[in-house]
Image (cartoon, grey):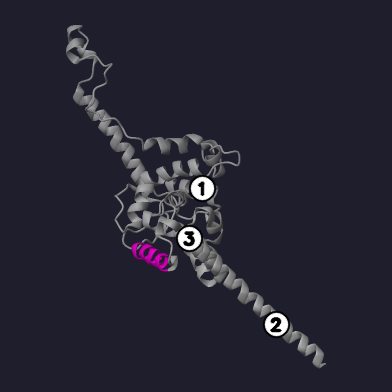
């Protein structure tokens, strides 16, 4: 398996060499489409295309974000999103387990921020109710304890899924029975037909995979003169823009096409004459 960063750099270099004259990278790389296909945010796609390093991201946050992304971009035929019930049922889980996983990664309010509806301790004390109200320290400890427990549970789940190595981009085998591993495999099977590591892959790997269709298209153009002619010179686009071309530019294009057609007709005439001579000889 190719290393993640060199693989992406190699793909971009190959694409650059195949673009040809008259086009730029922006003409063939659609950031919006690449983001949709890879699950990498648009701003991160732009960073990676420019050779920059993406910002660090917690692996569980990445998986959850891409679950949400799949629901928003891989829609039903009627244009609506797949429900959590539908997705979870496909791999034998409950809606609650999936929605809880997604909702667990929402930002928890800071325990230091008091609720505006909560009366001050001093006001409660004047009412003789202070003994019924836990101290701020106790409340903070409870909130922090719950938060740490939640993070611990999620971290244990992360250990059981296929995590790409930061050094090599290789995916370590999932530990059997891991809750997040089965969830990831189930969701990937629902959307892609089989587990493929899409939810947890590093941004570089995800973008490199999305770029392969672009690269293969350019390679087909390079191997097919007509495809290259359509892609590089954009004959249909030229025809559509003919009214906008200057008279001299339009004349050059017309002369060029006429020259090609004349050569082709001449070849046909020579071929027809050769066939007639061959027939008369017999």
Q: Is residue 10 magenta?
A: yes
Q: Main secondary structure of the magenta part?
A: helix
Residue mark closest to the camera, 3 vs 1? 3
Depth check: give the residue in front, 108 or 27: 27
> Tag 3: Cα neighbours inside 10 Å, few (<14), some, or many (≥20)?
some
Quadrant of the rendered image containing residue 19: bottom left
* Residue 71 x, y percent position in the rendering: 49, 41
| Mark nearer the N terminus (3 vs 1) | 1
For image coordinates 44% across by 67% down, the residue present is 20
Residue identifier under label 2: 271
Mark carried by residue 214: 3
Depth check: give the residue in front, 113 or 207: 207
Q: Is residue 109 magenta?
A: no
User: Is 280 above or below relative to 13?
Assistant: below
**Residue 43 visible to an observer of this rendering:** yes
> Tag 2: Cα neighbours inside 10 Å, few (<14), some, or many (≥20)?
few
SS at badge 2: helix
* Residue 176 x, y percent position in the rendering: 45, 53
Q: Residue furthest front?
A: 247
Q: Mark 3 to mark 1: distance in Å?
A: 28 Å
* Tag 2 and tag 1, C-beta contact below 8 Å: no
Q: Classify residue 64 as left or right of residue 114.
A: right
Mark carried by residue 186: 1
Q: Classify residue 52 as left or right of residue 77.
A: left
For image coordinates 23% across by 16% down, the residue present is 133
Q: Classify residue 65 as left or right of residue 167.
A: right
Residue mark closest to the camera, 2 vs 3? 2
SS at badge 3: helix
For the record, the magenta segment spans: 1-17
| Mark nearer the N terminus (2 vs 3) | 3
């Amino acid at each position: 398996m190719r290393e993640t960063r060199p693989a992406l750099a190699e793909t971009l270099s190959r694409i650059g060499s195949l673009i040809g004259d008259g086009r730029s990278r922006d003409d063939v790389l659609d950031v919006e489409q690449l983001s949709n296909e890879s699950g990498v945010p648009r701003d991160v796609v732009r960073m990676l295309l420019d050779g920059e390093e993406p910002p660090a991201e917690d692996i569980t946050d990445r998986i959850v974000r891409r679950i949400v992304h799949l629901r928003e971009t891989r829609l039903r035929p009627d244009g609506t999103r797949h429900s959590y019930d539908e997705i979870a049922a496909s791999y034998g889980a409950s809606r609650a387990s999936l929605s809880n996983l997604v909702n667990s990664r929402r930002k928890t309010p800071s325990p230091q921020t008091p609720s505006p509806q909560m009366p001050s301790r001093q006001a409660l004390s004047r009412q003789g109710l202070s003994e019924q109200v836990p101290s701020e320290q106790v409340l903070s400890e409870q909130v922090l304890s719950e938060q740490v427990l939640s993070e611990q549970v999620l971290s244990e789940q992360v250990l059981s899924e296929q995590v790409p190595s930061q050094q090599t981009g290789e995916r370590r085998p999932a530990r059997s029975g891991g809750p997040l591993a089965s969830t990831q495999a189930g969701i990937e099977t629902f959307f892609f037909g089989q587990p493929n590591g899409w939810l947890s892959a590093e941004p570089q790997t995800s973008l490199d995979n999305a770029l392969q269709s672009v690269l293969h298209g350019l390679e087909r153009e390079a191997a097919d003169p007509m495809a290259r002619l359509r892609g590089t010179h954009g004959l249909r686009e030229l025809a559509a823009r003919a009214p906008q071309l200057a008279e001299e530019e339009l004349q050059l294009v017309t002369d060029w096409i006429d020259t090609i057609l004349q050569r082709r007709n001449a070849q046909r005439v020579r071929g027809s004459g050769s066939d007639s001579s061959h027939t008369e000889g017999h």
